[in-house]
Image (cartoon, rainbow, N blue to C red):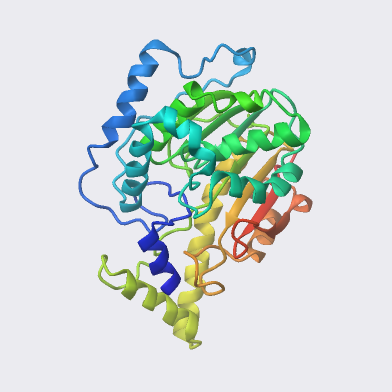
Amino acid sequence: RARKQQQQQAKIIRIRPDTATRARRIKAVGGCCLIVVVVLAVVGSMTQQNDPNDDGSSNIQHRLPMTCPKVYNEKGKEAQLYIKDDNMIAKDIPGYLKTFRTQEFDQWGKTYQEVKEKLTPYKSQKYASLRNGQAIFESACGIGLNLVMTLEILQEQHNITNLVVYGNDFVPDSVALANLLLQQGGILAHSQGHLGTLCQADSKNLSFAPSDSFDLVFTGYLTPLWDPLRAPVPSDDEDKMWEYYDKICAEKDKKQKKLYEKWLSTQEQWFTRWVREMIRIAKPGSPIILEQISQAYCDNDNDWDGVRQKFWKTFVADKQNGVDPHSLDMEPNKVDEDRYNVFMKKRK
């Protein structure tokens, strides 16, 4: 509990949310901040002059046809934190581009360069099947820096270049800023990467993205379902909510055990819906990579809930999920060692 409070005070959220009605510590608040206009207006004026999917590269003829769904207002409390940060960046894009490598990365408490150094061994190994000019998709991409980092690592470690990047996020300002940074900011130039399409969308519904299309699909964090049992406490009292879940973890009577099993099942269903969409849009035989997966809350109450590692063995064994069961690989995450990474391949 103390760690959660410290993180809230420091605004080290560390995770990227998705959709309005559910997830990651989300509680709806009335009215979307007017600051949403800042980034959207900048990108709106930009796209009047340039096609956001056209940077003049030789790869443009290979890009996937994709139409983003209608933009919606995300009113979650945590979305407002991201909107605030996004608009601060949008006020001085040139300044941000000069310093982003030494600034805090996505509210993780570490700089971009520190995170890159820790993720390089894993990304260098697990993403190495990619070839020049292929297409990758990041689910919940934020402002696009994990995409940038991934392309830099692949170029530096394997000389893989000309990758085309696609993705989605639930915060409209983040998507607008990502399009701005990746299109006009020049931060893909180091890896000779190209911008495909980035959309505001729910990661559990990527219907705008065609099936069997991407050479690799990944997420930098899969947001757990917030309050999966809908704790019978006031909606604005997070301490009471955590006490409710702590009690389920601590007590072993029949009633609490039943609640615990329901809790695990609800969270696992949430993860299944998210990852099935990632699998659907991947090409047969292509990697699906989940970075920074949180453990189930009762196994690690310093985090925001997640799923047990053994869940993934059941997941890949289910033929409905379309995964090669022999491809599953899990290992600790180097940025946050309480979390773990999951690697699998879509069945051919």
From the image, which quarter does the N terminus lie in?
Answer: bottom left
Determine the residue positioned at 45% across, 39% down: 169
Q: Is residue 132 above or below residue 175?
A: above
In which quarter of the view is residue 42 placed? top left
Q: Is residue 184 above or below residue 264?
A: above
Decide if residue 302 is in sight here.
Answer: yes
In which quarter of the view is residue 148 placed? top right
**Label total for image:** 0
In this view, the residue in front, 239 or 249, is 239
In this view, the residue in front, 54 or 343, is 54
Would residue 73 appear left or right of 201 to someone viewing this image? left
In which quarter of the view is residue 127 placed? top right
Determine the residue positioned at 49% across, 22% down: 183
Q: Is residue 29 above or below residue 51?
A: below
From the image, which quarter does the C terminus lie in?
Answer: top right
Q: From the top left corner, tell me how far across and down residue 206 is, in percent.
A: 49, 37
Q: From the top left corner, tell me how far across and down residue 128 is, in percent.
A: 76, 38
Decide if residue 1 is in sight here.
Answer: no
Determine the residue positioned at 48% across, 63% down: 266
Q: From the top left corner, tell me how far across and down residue 309 is, in percent.
A: 65, 64
Determine the residue positioned at 46% across, 23% down: 67
Q: Is residue 7 above or below residue 171?
A: below
Q: From the top left corner, tell me how far across and down residue 164 is, in percent.
A: 61, 25
In this view, the residue in front, 95 or 282, is 95
